Amino acid sequence: HLAIVQVPTGAAPEGAFTTIDAVLAQDDGGAPVALTPIAQREALLPSKLSGPGARPTVAAEIADGMRAYTIKVTDISGVGGHALPGDRVDVVLMRRLTNENNGSTTPNLVSQVVLQNVRVLGVDLNADPTSAKPAAPNNATLEVTVTDAQKLSMAASLGELYVRHAVVALV
């Protein structure tokens, strides 16, 4: 959706691209990713696009109206390190409830699906959707709605959150 627009001499911001080929060459010939919102007919500047060898930021990957929410995970609670940016996961809450029966406390484990089919934006500091390198994670950043972020915040205060790959089966 790029177009060349004629402007008076000296009206274009310093460093603005003057050809579409120059914009496409910005990311080593691949289509660059907008790092910040760009308005229609706004001059394109290199600082607004991913540059040579740069990878898109989480802000560039997130869909309109969505939010990034990061949860703490371990190699057990985070799909064994196999969840990668772009994957779809379910988030499950595990919590321990205690029942008091005749003076003794018996722990009960309860699980509940909090969110389903959520897109992974990043794992630890890896937000590169072309990455194929699994690693033991410490956190996972998920793409959620504001309401989903509230659910995750509440669920995290109740127990431990687990990420499970969302699996779709053909029947």
Image (cartoon, rainbow, N blue to C red):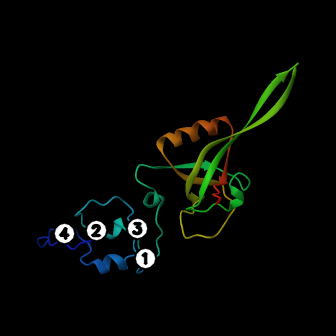
Label 3: state its secondary structure. loop
What residue is shown at x 46% (from left), y 56% (from top)? 62
Query: Mark 2 or 4 closer to N-term?
Result: 4
Mark 3 vs mark 4: which is more N-terminal?
4
Q: Amino acid at mark 3?
A: Val
Task: Compute the Cα span from label 3 to label 2.
Answer: 12 Å
Name the secondary structure under disc 4.
Answer: loop
Task: State yes or no: discs 2 and 4 in contact (Cβ < 8 Å).
Answer: no
Q: Which residue is mark 3?
A: 33
Which of the pair 157/15 is nearer the observer?
A: 157
The crowd level at tag 1 (other Cα within 10 Å; few <14, some 14-19, many 20+) is: few
Above or below, comparing residue 26 to residue 47 in the picture: below
- Whole-angstrom CA distance, mark 2 to mark 4, is 10 Å
Tag 2 or tag 3, which sits nearer the N-term?
A: 3
Residue at x 24%, y 63% (from the top left corner): 42
For this orientation, the residue located farthest to the top is: 102
Location of the C terminus (image quadrant): bottom right
Q: Reading the chain from its start, which is encountered first: label 4 or label 1?
A: 4
Q: Which mark is residue 12?
A: 4
Give the amino acid type for the residue marked by disc 1 in the picture. Answer: Pro
* Residue 121, percent from left and from top: 53, 58
- For label 1, the residue is 52
User: What's under tag 2, amino acid-wise?
Assistant: Leu
Label 4, label 1: how many angstroms apart (C-alpha)? 23 Å
Instruction: Name the residue at 67% across, 62% down.
Output: 82
Residue annotated with mark 2: 44
Residue 59 position in % (x across, y down): 44, 57
Q: Within 10 Å of the Cα at label 4, are there few (<14), some (14-19), or many (20+) other Cα atoms?
A: some
- Furthest toward the front, the residue is 171
Of callouts 3 and 1, which one flags the residue occurring earlier in the amino acid sequence? 3
Helix, strand or loop under label 2: loop
- Which numbered mark, 2 or 4, is in the foreground of this view? 2
